[in-house]
Image (cartoon, grey):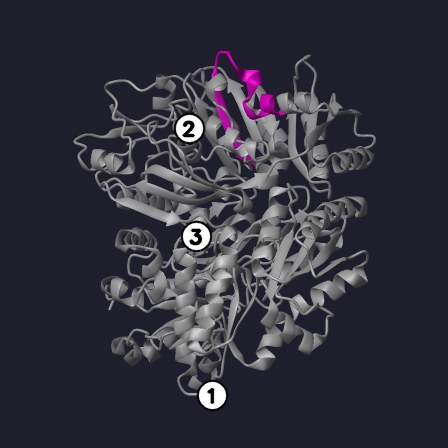
Amino acid sequence: MEMPVPNSAILSRKAQIVARLRMVLPADAVIDDPSETRAYECDALAAYRCPPLAAVLPASTEEVAAVLKICHDENVPVVPRGAGTSLAGGALPTADSVILGVARMNEVLETDYDNRIIRVQSGRTNLSVTGAVEEEDFFYAPDPSSQLACAIAGNIAMNSGGAHCLKYGVTTNNLLGVTMVMMDGTVVEIGGAHLDAAGYDLLGLICGSEGQLGIVTEATLRILRKPEGARPILVGYDSNEVAGQCVSDIIKAGVLPVAIEFMDRPCIRATEAFVGAGYPDCKALLIIEVEGSDAEIDSQLGVISQIARKHNPVELRESTSSEESAAIWLGRKSAFGAMGRINDYMCLDGTIPVSELPHVLRRIEELSQEYGLDVGNVFHAGDGNMHPLILFDANKPGDLETCEALGAEILKLCVEVGGCLTGEHGVGIEKRDLMKTQFNGPDMDIQMQVKDVFDPKWLLNPAKVFPLDISADRRSLAA
Amino acid sequence: MITDTMLAPTSEAELAEAIKDATSAIHIQGGGTRPIGQTSAQVVLTTARLTGIELYDPGALTLVAKAGTSVAEIEAALAAENQRLLFEPMDHRGLMGTEGTPTIGGVVAANVSGPRRIQAGACRDALLGVRFVDGQGTVLKNGGRVMKNVTGYDLVKLMAGSYGTLGVMSEMAFKVLPGIETQACVLINGLSNDAAVAAMCTALGSPFEISGAAHTPSGLDGHPVTMLRLEGFADSVTYRAKQLMTLLDGVGDMQVESDPDKVKAGWAWVRDVETFHGREGDVWRISVKPTDGPEIAGRVGGDVLFDWGGGLIWALVPSGTDLRTKLGHFRGHATLIRANVATKSAIPVFQPEPAPVAALANGLRAKFDPKGILNPGLMG
């Protein structure tokens, strides 16, 4: 993956830049020793690494504003960092950039159950937002797999999803307001505890902009009352087509499950070997979860199992207790770990129209054979968000490159059938150069013009999202 | 109504040509049923002839339609598959005193969302993708037709509610939802605004999935009524209505309306703000934090209707009232929905924004419409 050549003028001014940062932040909040900046050299896309010029850990909106003002003045690129769990390289530094980490801003500022909102500093982890309100039986709905570690700042930057978005939506549907610092240090308040924008929907624009428009320091999030209960059903089929048809029929029947998860044979076998969840050895496995009171769950699961039986499943297991639910979820929740035990893997994130599922799975199988790398599929079938896991050996020369080439083919396939490159992980550097398969020149240019408005000098996370060649002129503005 | 003096392209290519060739500013319309705000542009361009459902995939819960497609056609197509639009768009004709056919493009341009907004999200939340023509006549697309998509910036949300000032939308894709078996409404009589909002907060903070929470200080018989809607399978609706009444026990005189037709009519009354139809005066729409609702409504000094659990206040005030001055400082925003030309010229239709936010909005407008020809003046 190509990254821009660092600006030598900035590298040579390192001492001066760090000294200015030290004037506005406590001593321990500015990190410039190469042995320490290495901690920030990568995110969860660990194949790519580069230590930054320096890293700063401001503790307030004011400190963020002070840092950005200096970097704006010095023309230094700034790479925002939540918890560093991006799978797309969203927080990968360049050698001439300052990493701005929000980890020290993790306070709950306000909890309001009457209005069903919580206001937090953006460095707070996703799961600890729910943690702050679960005593009152409330929760924050978006639940990315990394929710134990990932920060709300990163969730907003990538518009993160999770397993339950079929019912509850993704981050953008649960975000009501932000305090954001612009690259020049200006602080803006957008949205709040009320609904919808007064003018343009800037909140919707900021969410998912990968830290390129501003740095969100505080967020107002919608919280929801927990359902009375939830229970899954497990159904196994001997063909992907039939499983796909079953998903489609369930959706058409008027039941809205909170999650529909899909695993294919390679994943089923890997998880069986790993945790022994007792899954049937079949081609395709569905886990469908519904919510409500006990009676409501029984009745919804009744409808679902009736539909599922029409398609002749090899196995059908309705959970009747929390123990049985846990057993059904065990394999799914260990799927990534199970695949990781076999080999290194690359996790893709394309989304397709649900009706294209059988076709896409068949094509992935063919591509996997063509490239000689195994691919396991485990994904959110209800919303078409695929997560093909390509297995490769990082120690084998050329394997990573083959894996990336296969990944690119699969993502192109997603776009071809009417889908997109990324459903919840973001573009980052990983899918930057594939943007041209989804967007034409003008489609990308209008997006870059939006960045021109928010960050005219292109200093915020500049080498991400857009292919380097088309953003080159803009990125060289400040240099 | 499409007249001879209007530009009425029949394809996206014609739409792009019309904008590219424009020698003066353009007033963009869908069906012309929601004349919110005003523009200095004289030439009207209507999207009403860009019609048709392009794709409807019930198994994937997605529908793609051209901008001029009537809302009625879309709702009928969905109903035939027992599906529906999540966001329950309001029909403005009764309130605005307009005629014509509401189009889906108009709904998106004004981000029109009804009572279910509190549970299922706004129009913008159901919008998956848009195609539009910018102020220079360039055809652009953003988003797509899949439910999860974070590829590039989300201009889809930006276009929703931009009233044609950033581009003229030609096509849009929606996430749709399964239809419901039945609906019921718990009605509470005689509550003050404060007690009603408190009851609605309790209901919305329960696990019983309330899909509408509204309060009128003067219902059909002149007395206050608070309405809480439940939707879903019959057994579940019955169960939740019972649980809800137990939860709210002691709040006031309560009953359940379970005739689905009556419930539907009641919520159409709320959605379309029927209580103000045919009445003199200006209509304002105020979005606030729900618990601030009663206090803000008190400052209005006119008739009000609460929706969204107290977070949306519809207000009817004497013509020419500068309501924002009366409201004073509050967190939220007020939009002047219906007023005569003189009032709309004197009072900003949209809530004025703080300088740094207004600078961003102006900056975006200058990029999307550098010649300033799309609905100039409507949003600044």
Say if labels 1 and 2 share a chain. no
Q: Dot 1 falls on which chain?
A: A
Residue marked by disc 2: B103
Q: Which residue: 33% across, 78% down?
A: A14
User: Could you tell me which quadrant the N terminus of chain A lies in?
Assistant: bottom left
**Is there a contact, CB below 8 Å, between mark 3 and mark 2?**
no
Left or right of B195? Residue A194 is left
**Segment colored magenta:** B267-288
* Residue A108 shows in this picture: no
Q: Which residue: 72% across, 56% down?
A: A233
The amino acid on which the numbered mark 2 sits, given as a three-letter code, is Thr
Residue marked by disc 1: A395
**Is there a contact, CB below 8 Å, between mark 3 and mark 1?**
no
Q: Which of A12/A130 is in front?
A: A130
**Crowd class of label 1 (few under 14; some 14 to 19; many from 20; radius 10 Å):** few
The amino acid on which the numbered mark 3 sits, given as a three-letter code, is Ile
* Residue B39 shows in this picture: yes
Q: Which of B255/A340 is in front?
A: A340
The amino acid on which the numbered mark 1 sits, given as a three-letter code, is Asn
Residue marked by disc 3: A206
C-alpha separation, residue under disc 3 versus residue under disc 1:
39 Å
C-alpha separation, residue under disc 1 versus residue under disc 2:
58 Å
**Of labels 3 and 2, the one closer to you:** 2
Picture quadrant where residue A73 is located: bottom left
Left or right of A85? Residue B259 is right
Does A378 lie within the magenta span?
no
C-alpha separation, residue under disc 3 versus residue under disc 2:
28 Å
Left or right of A112? Residue A2 is left
User: Could you tell me which quadrant the C terminus of chain A lies in?
Assistant: bottom left
3 or 1: tag closer to the N-terminus: 3
**Crowd class of label 3 (few under 14; some 14 to 19; many from 20; radius 10 Å):** many
**Crowd class of label 2 (few under 14; some 14 to 19; many from 20; radius 10 Å):** many
